[in-house]
Amino acid sequence: MADKMPRIITYSLRRGAQNSDEYYRVIARFADDWTAHAVRVLKDVFIGFRLFRQEGGLSDRSDAEYAFELLALGVLLREHGAEAARSPEWWTRAQSWLVEAQERWPLRLRSGRAQAESAVKKARGWLGWIGRRMRARRADGGDAARLIAWLKANGDDAKADRLAQWQGFFEALGPSPAKQVVARCLALADDFAVESARALGPYTEQVERFLSETAPKYHHRYDADLVSRTRLEYHLGLLGTEVLSRAYRARFLSAKRKIVIVPPCMRAQPEEKCKAIETPFGAKCQACTPACRVHQITKLGEKRGFEVYIIPDELRGIGAEAGRAIEGLGLVGVACALTNWSGGWQADALGIPAQGVLLDFVGCKYHWDEKGIPTDTNLHKLEEVLGKEEQHEQKKTVVSI
C-alpha cells in the first residue's frame, strides 16, 4: 500500500518520491529561517505581551510560539477577516449552536446518533452557504474580535481560544497601538505568503485546481469552509506543525506514557469492515489486515512502547472520556496539514504535550474523495518524533560492543 503513488487531491509531501523525507528537511530549514526573522522583527511585541501575561498570572511561552501565533492571526485575518466582519450576530449564534449539537449529541445518543449528526451537518451546510452569500462583498479585514467570534462559530475553538489571549492584550493596549500591532501581523502574513510559496509551494501545487474545480461543489456541505482553505493556509499548517512540535518537544519526551492518534482514513478497510474496537481514547486496531498502515504502526508501537488509537475528530473524545488518564501523557497526532497544527493548541489546552506528524497526502471519504483513498505518513519521521528510533540504534550499538 505504501509503495503506490496516490492521486494528489490537494497537497503531497512526496512530490513523486516514495516517501516524504525530503519535505521534512525542507520544512526544518524553512522553520529555522522564518522563526529567526519573525522573532527579530516582533521582539518588542513579545516583551509587552509577556508583561501582560505575567501581570495576569499566566504562563509564558517561547518567542517562536508567539511569532507563530501572530502569523496565524495575520493569515486568518488576511484570508477570512472580511467574511468574519460581515457575519451577522444571529448567524454566529446559530452556527455555534449547531457546532455544539454536532459535538455533543453523538456522545449522548446510542440509537439514531448517526441520523442526528447527519441532520446537524446538513443544517450547518445550508447555514454556512447562507452566511457566505451574505458576506460576499469585501469588508475591513482587521477586526480580530470579529475573527475570533467567527472561528468559534465554525468550531475552531483551539484557534479562537489562543487568539483570544492576544485580543485581551490588544484591548489593554488601546485602539491605536492595537491597530498598529494588527497591521504588523498582516504585513507578516503578506511576507509569509511570498516566502512560503517559494519554499513550500511545490508541495501544494494541486490546491488551486481543487479550489476551482471541486470545492464549489461543496457549497451546501458543512465542511465547505474546510475544503475551501487557501494555499496560504496549507503553508501556515505546514509551518505550524513544525514550530509547535519543537515548542512542546521537551515536555513530550519527559512524558511517561505516549500514544499516537491516527485518522480513520489511514485504515486499509472501509469503516464497516474494520474490526477496530472502541476504547476511551479511540478505536484500537485488531490486526484484521496486515497491509493496513494502522496495523503496522500498532505493531511498531508494541515493539517500541507506545499505544495507537484511531480518532476521527482530533481530541474531542480524549478530554471528555479519558478523564484523569491524560495525566503524564505525551501525544503524537497524525493528521492533515490543515488540522494538525491547531490540534497542537488543542492538546496544549488539555495539558498534553503533543507532537505533530503530517499525513503525506489527503484522501478521506468524509471530505476529499467520494470513495476514499487510504492515506499514509512517514514512519521514519514518526519514530524520530517518538524518540524511539534513536534509542533503538543506541541499544544495537551497545549490544554490538
Image (cartoon, rainbow, N blue to C red):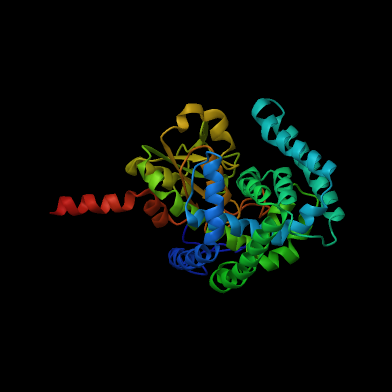
Residue drawn 72% across the image and 49% down it:
145
Residue drawn 79% across the image and 39% down it:
93
Instruction: List the single residue furthest toward the left.
Output: 401
66 left or right of 84 in image: left
Which of 233 and 399 lies nearest the eye of the viewer? 233
Q: Quadrant of residue 337?
A: bottom right
Please state, as top left, top right, bottom left or bottom right, where the C terminus lies in the image.
Answer: bottom left
204 left or right of 83 in image: left
Which of 249 and 286 lies nearest the eye of the viewer? 249
Residue 364, horizontal then vertical, whole percent = 62, 51
Residue 31, horizontal then vertical, whole percent = 48, 64
| Residue 268 visible within the image | no
| Residue 199 visible within the image | yes
Residue drawn 43% across the image and 64% down it:
21
Residue 150, horizontal then vertical, whole percent = 74, 48
Q: How many marks?
A: 0
From this view, report whether residue 2 is shown above or below residue 212.
above
From this view, report whether residue 279 is shown above or below residue 44.
above
Residue 398, horizontal then vertical, whole percent = 17, 51
